[in-house]
Amino acid sequence: MNSLSQTLNSSIARKVVMALTGLFLAAFLAEHLYGNLLLYYNDNGAAFNEYSHTMVHNILIRMVEVFLFAAILLHVAQSIAITRKNNAARPVKYQVRKDGETSNWFSRNMGITGSVIFFFLVVHLRTFFVPYRITGIGEDGSLALVVKEAFANGWYSSFYVAASLILGFHLNHGFQSAFQTLGMNNKQYAGLIRNTGTVFAVVMGAGFASFPIIFYFNLLGR
Amino acid sequence: MSETINLTLKVWRQADAGSEGRFVIYDMQGVSTHMSFLEMMDVLNERLIKKGEEPVAFDHDCREGICGMCSMFINGRAHGPMDATTTCQLHMRHFKDGETVVVEPWRAGPFPVIKDLVVDRSSFDRIMQAGGFISVNTGNAPDANATPVPKADADEAFAAAACIGCGACVAACKNASAMLFVSAKVSQFALLPQGQVERTDRVQAMVRQHDLEGFGGCTNTGACEAECPKEISISHIARMNREYLFSIAKGDK
Amino acid sequence: MATLDAKIPPGPLSDKWTKYRSTCKLVNPSNKRNIEVLIVGSGLAGASAAASLGELGYRVKVFCFQDSARRAHSIAAQGGINAAKNYQNDGDSVYRLFYDTIKGGDYRAREANVYRLAEVSASIIDQCVAQGVPFAREYGGLLSNRSFGGTQVQRTFYAAGQTGQQLLLGAYSALNRQVHLGNVQVFSRHEMLELVLVDGKARGIIARDLESGKIERHSGHAVVLASGGYGNVFFLSTNAMGSNVTASWKAHKKGAFFGNPCFTQIHPTCIPVSGDYQSKLTLMSESLRNDGRVWVPKAKGDKRHPAEIPDQERDYYLERRYPAFGNLVPRDVASRAAKQVCDEGRGVGQSGLAVYLDFRDSIKRLGEPVIRERYGNLFEMYEKITGENPYHIPMRIYPAVHYTMGGLWVDYNLMTTVPGLYALGECNFSDHGANRLGASALMQGLADGYFVLPYTIGEYLSGEIRNKPTSTDHPAFADAEKEVHERISRLMSVNGKQTVDDFHKRLGNIMWNYCGMARNEQGLTKAKNMVRELRAEFWKDVRVPGAAAGLNPELEKAGRVADFLELGELMIEDALTRKESCGGHFREESQTEEGEAKRNDDDFAYVGAWEYKGSETAPVLHKEELKFEEVHLTQRSYK
């Protein structure tokens, strides 16, 4: 029958890669949000800084980090490949389309939301990851302080809020789509998966959007 | 409701596969609201012939929503504005007087235009030929009641088997993916005891042919399900994905 | 000249087929590989025959005019398929199915063929289930049955209201498997336009590739027609738009006799015509008459809303005339009664050509949910087409042409009077006599293709193993191709003023008015001339736009209508000759005092098989006397 490379290059296998990397990244987001929530401790960022420190110095977590970056790259590369192939499947376009009557905008435009998220990621890494891990913020530097300073900028914070909301929509479709791709969708638990995905997406979107809002308006009052 | 309406039709005309196509505008006066969309096209064609022009070619046959031959992308929707309806069962009472109606052929690489609104859907046949069958020679069958099939499975298999092969799923999908079509057959046979023997080979062969034909991949937008005249659910796509993953896991071939 | 030898095997009725199968000639496997069979049509009969012959090792080519073999009109059959399984333990048997079919056909079918049909019916269900056809099932997982008109047992297997679709897709999947294995080639968007005879035997066909317009020659050791019925001669019917007589008619003109052409089935419950633009009629399942009451106003021209017509001003004419069977009289009786009340001027709706099928009383008695559960999908379909809600307003229905029992005459082997030319399914005349029972068409198509032809064709092909395939360079192919070219250029060159549909509609009107539900000598005689004149006018004034090359649907239609114009005359001729009423053929001269159909077994217990003698020469009637050895002939009564 099909050779292994044929099987792995099939449209379903490619989707499975998207689903698995997507779910892995979603799991990371949950973990990331947990870490970030430590910023809300009224301890001048001590818990958050300690957490960040652990993240960097735990060998297991450093190994997982490699997978994380690999997953991001794979998710992006695969999505580009799939999008190109899917676009090629309709060389002549319709003049009139009423897609809105049959499907949701976000489900059709994961590429656009994904691109925004990717751009956001680059900015995000530039702001926090690069100084913290590469160029250095000094021996006594507090990452929590870096966060606070970054979100003092209104434009920067607005961008963060927008990107977080878009992330939420991306996740809302992505979550249930991943389960569908992995074959986990039938009449009994389709609703459960969809609702879980929506709750997850709302929590992630709202959760990440909360940081720039709270720090910009200094709602913690400190 | 008025009995007749006037429409402006904007119809894709293309002499043959190799020619450039374009939209041609036709003024359709006095369309009875009782007509089906195809009967309205008949009237247009009769008028064109009498004027010495060539009629619009379009596919159609049974005109009762089951043969799957009729197509047409009408005002941005496969088979027109109604859900769960083929073009032959779409009636003109759903259009407004004075409306402009844009009629395009199915658009997909694996569905090349043959003429006007007629496209070549033989790619669907080739997908079926790749594995859409249970290998049983005539006369080899055991008694029909020898293997009971749970009613729920039989009903679900029927729901999948109701596919009419019209291609609306492909036409509606932003990726021109035929996954709903493929999954309907894979799912039907995966649910039935008779289909078990060839289960892994079948899904591999059919998905491979689907990809070879140049259809896009599924991105789970659900547009196919919304547009399917027989309301086939994308849960069949999930089942196909599952079958595919099992077939990879099984791997012995 | 060909004679009518039905080649019925000797011996008792119940042993004929068993004995035949054990003693018929065979073709050995290595010879089968060298034998090519051409099959025209991909419906139940064609697809099942192609798959089965492919499995046996023959090389098969299948032709269909649709864009895929899966779209043949068998797909539209709703109700079910009969089989003598006796799963319900209600006393069914091969004999009972045989008897019901013969009786339902008003004693105008051949006993031996019908008995064989009943015998193989059970295997069809086994085969289809093995192919993965999702028949309806009970909670225990076993197959479910329903009952149909003309029988007292539950022997109908079904898949919701889409049984034909599911059976056809089963046959299509078997066909696809043979394509996959390289035994069968499918030529879709191809139409057979001529039969090729070499030394009096069918040796090939000329087909037009409908996409390119190219005329192709295909050679084979045998040709099998499974091209369906000719109901579209009436223009409006429940047939698909493309259903046509062309393949059968070309064969007829090349020597195949046409059996009982006037036997057409008119189905009583269809959605009525709503305007002159109407292109086809949609069937509403017979089952609706279980709970719907048929009525018209008592007064002529009563245009009130049905709800405003009180009960005492309604005429429930079926219940009045046939108290024993009421609304459930057989199809032919119900159709004729509807025509009569409309002819009296009591029809309803805009056109006056409709009667009410009213569920008001059933809804009152059983409640809307019960009715919805029983007929929900049909009510939805009705509403989609008419825009009216049948839960509140009675359905309007009218009879429509549905099926043709007549077709190419075949012997017990399903071979026509042309050696090597077979006819299967609706395109032959064989099993339904003068009236087909519900759920029997699917049974016949699949019986012919899966279980009969694979045996009987060996009988002929065993004599062909020494013959190399005929070269398509043979002069017979060149001649046939020339005929096709000439006919096409003739059609293209008339360049008149009327469209093909103009002629088709006029032909349909003539046939419907004079050779439809009721026929009489005077009308038929008149109609014969009208059809002849119309045909002459067609060849002078038809306009076929476009070119002969490339896809040209109008050219396809023109060729088909030209053949219908010839067939129509033959149907009228047959109806004129058969001066009796039987099944779907009602001659007004032959009725009882109460206005019921009266058969004449002394003079007309025969199959009328017509021989073509030229377009301007009268056809010649050959009679196959029907001998009833098992069944006793009686007059049907539903009073």
Image (tube, rainbow, N blue to C red):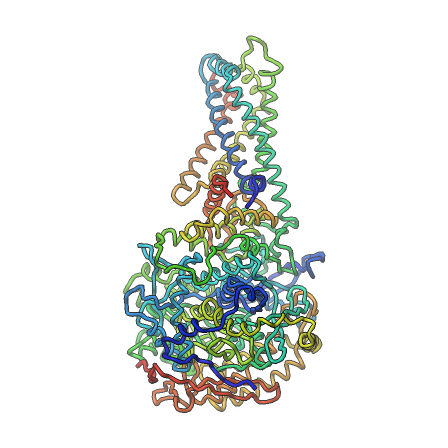
Image location (x, y in percent) of residue C586: 43, 84
Residue situated in front as seen by the camera: C125 or C346: C125
**Total numbered labels:** 0
Q: Is residue B91 visible?
A: no
Residue at x 49% of width, y 21% of height: A36
Image location (x, y in percent) of residue C631: 34, 81
> In this image, C57 relative to C162: left or right?
right
Residue situated in front as seen by the camera: C316 or C188: C188
Residue at x 39% of width, y 89% of height: C600
Please say if B219 is above or below C613.
Answer: above
Image location (x, y in percent) of residue C45: 49, 68
Image location (x, y in percent) of residue C470: 64, 72
Q: Is residue C67 visible?
A: yes
Residue situated in front as seen by the camera: C8 or C529: C8
Q: Where on the picture, by quarter, is residue A136? A: top right
Name the outermost residue toward the top. Answer: A140
